[in-house]
Image: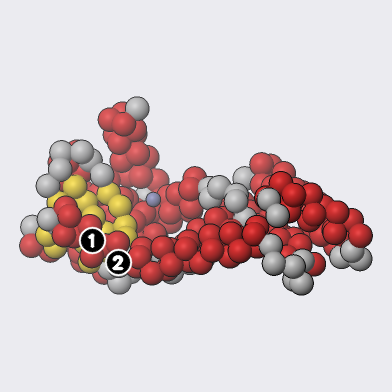
Amino acid sequence: MNIIGEINCFGFCLRLSELAPYVALLIVIAIALFAARLIIKRPEQKLLTLIGAQLAILSAIAAAFYLMKCSDMLTIHLYLAYAGISLFLIFGVLRFYDRIMIKRLGARPAREMIGWTQEFVDKLTNATVYYYDSAVPKAFAAGRSIFLSLGLLELLNDDEIKAVLAHESWHIRNNSRMPFLKQLALMTFSPQRETDIEDLADYFAAKIAGSDALFSARSKLDKIFN
Ligand SMILES: [Zn+2]
């Protein structure tokens, strides 16, 4: 059976099944939550609304597959393979991303050069701060590591660096949840909203380092990248 034929078949079988109203309800809930996301302002609630919508879609997909359980369908095999490969990449490979980046960037522990950055992060989370040689001002977190480029350390003053470190520390504190969000986004074919997550990290950074430091760090970086 070809894919188009199978999709028609899903529609046909769903219409005949007594599960149809539930699947329709799940889809309506998902659409309503996606719409609500556009109105909601607080990043935390925005993210929760998105997760709710994605869970509704995932349940609708599971219900549709359950209906077809007796038939050997290419779409189900493809979907399961897609889920398995993304699961492997997200949970298996991404875990070692910081190890890979330390090697690739030739990163050095920041405590060798700017000890206070490590002491500052120690108060917020359990992570090692690294610096690496690049003129491009950049900071990112991976695994239990925070990376700062020399360009960033030159561009920002100490207060602004603290705001960046607090932002990245939030990522480290929440890193264990991110793979689940990524997986959910992939399995429901809905793009992950990085901005919600970045807003949450900024909210935390402003609380720790002050909104002035965060704002001036942001505007210095925006000036370079825009
Ligand atoms: Zn971030």
Q: Secondary structure at mark 2?
A: helix
Q: Is residue 96 left or right of residue 195?
A: left
Badge 2 crowding class, 10 Å Cα cut-off, few under 14, some 14 to 19, many 20 or more, is few
Most extreme residue toward the left, as rendered?
112
Q: Give coordinates of residue 111: x percent, y percent.
A: 12, 63
Q: Which residue is mark 2?
A: 96
Q: In the picture provided, is 5 more to the left or to the right than 13?
A: left
Give the residue drawn at x 50%, y 58%: 182
Kind of element beneath mark 1: helix
In the image, what residue type sits under mark 2? Phe
Q: Quadrant of residue 154?
A: top left
Residue 142 in the image: x percent, y percent?
32, 60
Between 150 and 61, the one nearer to me in the picture: 61
Residue identified by numbered label 1:
100
Residue 87 in the image, given as x and y percentages of width and height: 48, 66
Quarter containing the C terminus: top left
